Amino acid sequence: MIRYLIKNNFKLMMRSATNILLFIVTPVVLVALLSSAFGDLLEKYERDDSIKAGYRIDAEDTDVRAQLLAEQVRTAADESDMILTEYPKCDIEEKIMEEDLAGFVVFGKDGTYSIYENGEQKYEAKALDYLISSVDKHIAQFMLDAYRSDMPSEASVAVKYPSYMEPIEASDYYGIVEVVYFGWCAVVCGAGIFTAEKKYHIGKKLRVSGLSELQLFFGKFIPMLLVVSISSLITAGITILLFGVHWGSPLISALIVVLSAAAATAFGLMFYNITENVVVTIIAVFALVWMAGFTGGSFETYMFSTQPQQLKDISPIYHINRALTELSCMGHSDYTRSAVIYCIIIMFVSACVSIMAGYIRGRKGK
Amino acid sequence: MGTILKTKDLTKKYDGRVVVDNLNLTIEEGEVFGLLGPNGAGKSTTMNMICGIVKPTLGSVEFHGKDFDKHRKELIVELGYIPQELAIHGNLKAWENVELFTSLYGIGGAELKKRIDESLEYVGLLEKKNDYAKTFSGGMKRRLNIACAIGHHPDLLIFDEPTVGIDPQSRNFILEKIRESNKNGATIIYTSHYMEEVEAICSRIAIMDNGKVIATGTSEELKKMVVEDTSSITLEEVFLTLTGKKLRDY
Ligand SMILES: Nc1ncnc2c1ncn2[C@@H]1O[C@H](COP(=O)(O)OP(=O)(O)OP(=O)(O)O)[C@@H](O)[C@H]1O
Ligand SMILES: [Mg+2]
C-alpha cells in the first residue's frame, strides 16, 4: 500500500529544517528585499499624463490583416488613454524627439509591425509595446477561431481590450513571483529522501517488495508536491500578512501555484531518475530554473526586462508569473490558459520520462 | 517437505568479470541453510539476484516451484529480505520504519498496527517504538532492520550477514530469533563468514568461493571432506582448507 510510503516520505521531508528554511524563510526575505529595491522602478510606472506615441501604415490599403491590426490598436489606445497620432511621412527618430513621443509604430505587411522606442521614456515605450502585442495576440486568436469554426469573414473582431499594463505594486509583484520561483526549486525538498534511499539502500528494499516504477514515482511525487504546495501557500499567507500582497482571485491563483509546484516536482524528479545523483540534479535543475526565472521575470520584472519576447515565451515561469500578476492587478489574464497548459505538459512529460528511466534501469538490472 | 527455492545456472558478470558462476542451489522447506564464503565470494550478489534487485546475466530462480521473475507479484509476499546494509530511515521512528516496509506488502489499517507491534516485540524494541532510528545503537539498528522485513509473515527469510559489527549479546539474541522463526515454520537462508554462527544454527551449509559453491553438506559432512576424525577439526579449518589462505582483495 503506497499510502504509507507517501505518508512516511512526507514526514521525512517535514522533519527537515532545510526545507522550511528554503521554502518559507528565504522567499519571505527575498520578497522584502526585492520589493524595496525595485519599488522605485515600478512606481515610476504609475503616471498621470497620457502616453504619447506615433504610427505609420506602410502596408497596402488592401492588406486586410495590417489594416485590422492598425484599427484595433487605435481603438485599444483610445480606451487606454494613450494618444496615438498618425504621421504618414516623416523621419521617425526626428519625430520622436520633436513630439516627445514614447515610441513609434510602423505597421508593415500582413500584420507585422515594428516599434521604435524612446530611450528616455523606457517604461512608456514598454507600455506601448505591451498594448500592441496584446492586441496582435487577440487578433491572431480570433482569426484562428474564425478559421476553425467557418465563421463568415465579415464578422467583426470582438476584442476585449486589455487594460494595458495596469500598475502593480512592487510588493505584489515580488510577493507573487518569488513564491513561484521557490516552488520551482521543489526538487530540493526530496534531496533528503534521495540521499537516504541511496545511502541506506532503501531503494533496494523498496524494489524487493515489488513496487512498480509508477508506484515508486508517486511515492515520491505526491509527498514532494504536498510539501511544496503547503509551504508555498504558507509563504503566500505570510507575505499577505507582512506585506499586504494581493493575490487577485485566490482560488485560481492557488490552483496555478499548486500546478506550477506539480510541474516543478515532476521536472526535478525526472532529473533525479535519469542521473540518480542528487548533486547533479540540484545543480542542473537550479541552473535551468534560474534561466527560466531570469527570462520569466523572477528577478527583473518581465515588463521592463530587455529579453526578447521569444525567450520569455519559452519560459514556463514567464507564463505563470504573468498569469498570477495580471490576476492580481487586473483580475483576469490571457496567460492563465497558457500557464496551466504549460504546467500540465511539463508534468506529464517529466512523469513519463521518469518512469521510463526507472523501468529501463530496472530492466538492465544494475 | 519439498523444495522451496532453486537457483538454476545463476550467473552474474560485472564488466566481464564473473562474480557468481553457474550457481545451482536447492533450499529445502523448513531448513536453515548457511551460505559461507570469504569477502567478495559473491554471497550478497547471489541474494540480490534471488530477491530481484540484481538481474542475473544468465540463469533463473525458482521459488515455490514457479519462475520467480515471471511470478514476482504473486510470490513476493512470501519473501523477507534482511539486507547486509542497514536499510532504515534515521529520521523515522522505529515504528514508522516498520510501518513503511510492512505496508508495501498490501497490509494496512488495524492489521498493520498489530503487525508493527508484533515485529518490534519480536526483536525486543517495542519499548523503543517511538524513538528515532538515528538514536539507536548498532545492535538496535540491526534488530530494527530485521523487524522491517518480517511483518508480512514471509515463509522464506534471507539474512545477509545480520550480525556484522555487533556485540555478543545482540548476536546471540538475533541467532535465537532466527531459530525461533525457523521453529515457527519459516525457511531461512543465512549468509555469513562467522563459522561458529553458521555451525550453531544451520542444518546445511554451502561454502562459496569465487562465485562457485565448492562444497555442500552438514557441518559433519564438510569436516569429513577434509579429515577422517572430525572431532579434531573446526569448521574454520575446513573453510580455510577449502578456500585457501590467500586474501581476497578485488
Ligand atoms: N555493482 C557492482 N559492480 C561491480 N562489481 C560488483 C558489484 N557488486 C559487487 N561486485 C563485486 O562482486 C564481487 C562479489 O560481491 P558480493 O558483495 O556478492 O560478495 P560477498 O560474498 O557478499 O562479500 P562480503 O562478505 O564482503 O559481503 C565482489 O568482488 C564485488 O567487488
Ligand atoms: Mg555480502
Image: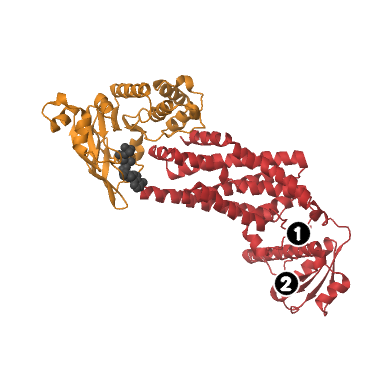
Chain colours: A red, B orange
State which mark lies toward you, 2 or 1. Answer: 2
Callout 1: chain:
A
Tag on residue B170?
A: none
What residue lies at 49% left-to-right and 42% top-to-bottom? A194
What residue lies at 85% left-to-right and 61% top-to-bottom? A81
- As rendered, which of B57 and A135 lies closer to the eye? B57
Callout 2: chain:
A
Q: Position of residue B14 (x, y in %)?
A: 32, 49
What residue lies at 19% left-to-right and 32% top-to-bottom? B238
Q: Quadrant of residue A20?
A: top right
Badge 2 vs badge 1, beta-carbon distance below 8 Å: no
The residue labelled by disc 2 is: A113
- As rendered, which of B28 and B240 lies closer to the eye? B240
Q: Residue furthest front?
A: B246
Q: Residue furthest top?
A: B127
- As rendered, which of A195 and A102 lies closer to the eye? A195
Tag on residue A160?
A: 1
Q: What's under tag 2, amino acid-wise? A: Tyr
- Left or right? Give the position of A123 relative to A4: right
Tags 2 and 1 on a common chain: yes
Q: Is residue A54 above or below residue A13?
A: below
Q: Residue furthest left?
A: B228
Which tag, 2 or 1, sits closer to the chain's start?
2
Asked whether the viewer can see residue A290, the reply is yes
What residue lies at 37% left-to-right and 49% top-to-bottom? A363
Q: Position of residue A151 (x, y in %)?
A: 67, 66
Q: Quadrant of residue A190?
A: top right
Asked whether the viewer can see residue B26, the reply is no
Q: Position of residue B32 (x, y in %)?
A: 26, 28
Q: What's under tag 1, amino acid-wise? A: Lys
Q: Characterize the local packing of mark 2: few (<14), some (14-19) or many (20 or more) Cα atoms within 10 angstroms.
A: many
Q: Position of residue A42 (x, y in %)?
A: 79, 54
